[in-house]
Amino acid sequence: MKIDNELIKYLESLARITLEPDEEKAISSELQEILTYIDMLGELDTDSAEAMSHCLPITNVFRKDIPAPSLTPAEITANAPESQDGLFVVPKTVD
């Protein structure tokens, strides 16, 4: 893909920015280098590479979910500055 002035103007409008002519030239060459590198990566033989979702080996570190008794609403709200019917009372934030 060739980066031309029309594409740069389109990208400027998408980003809602205005570039000076010298900045447009610099961005154009940088984008062209990026696209050339991406094309080079596309030429690599990845058929023997195993698909992975992460670059590091990650294992599940969660513990088993074991049901246990929990606190009652009265115990939960015991230290609250104000509670009503087992719920926390907080200042109104929306009118």
Image (cartoon, rainbow, N blue to C red):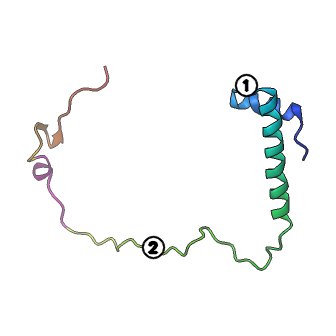
Highlighted range, magenta? 69-77
Element marked by disc 1: loop
Quarter where residue 84 is shown = top left
Q: List the residue tagged with mark 1.
A: 18
Q: List the residue tagged with mark 2.
A: 60
Q: Residue at x 13, y 46 (%)?
A: 77
The question of residue 18 being in magenta is answered with no
Quarter where residue 62 is shown = bottom left
Report crowding for label 2: few under 14, some 14 to 19, many 20 or more residues within 10 A (C-alpha): few
Q: Is residue 39 left or right of residue 93?
A: right
Relative to 21, residue 53 above or below: below
Relative to 56, residue 72 above or below: above
Q: Is residue 8 left or right of residue 75?
A: right
Report crowding for label 1: few under 14, some 14 to 19, many 20 or more residues within 10 A (C-alpha): few
- Of residues 93 and 44, the one drawn nearer to the viewer in this rendering: 44
Q: Quadrant of the C terminus?
A: top left
Q: Is residue 81 left or right of residue 46?
A: left
Q: Position of residue 22 (x, y in %)?
A: 80, 31
Q: Tell me the amino acid under the disc marked 1.
A: Thr
Q: Position of residue 23 (x, y in %)?
A: 77, 33
Question: What label sits on residue 67 in the rendered view?
Answer: none
Q: Position of residue 48 (x, y in %)?
A: 77, 80
Q: Position of residue 90 (x, y in %)?
A: 20, 33
Q: Residue at x 54, y 76 (%)?
A: 57
Q: Tell me the amino acid under the disc marked 2.
A: Asn
Query: In the image, which is nearer the foreground, mark 1 or mark 2?
Result: 1
Q: Residue at x 79, y 73 (%)?
A: 46
Q: Is residue 80 left or right of residue 65?
A: left
Distance from disc 1 to disc 2, alpha carbons, whole Å, reads 47 Å
- Of residues 18 and 25, the one drawn nearer to the viewer in this rendering: 25
Element marked by disc 2: loop
The question of residue 76 being in magenta is answered with yes
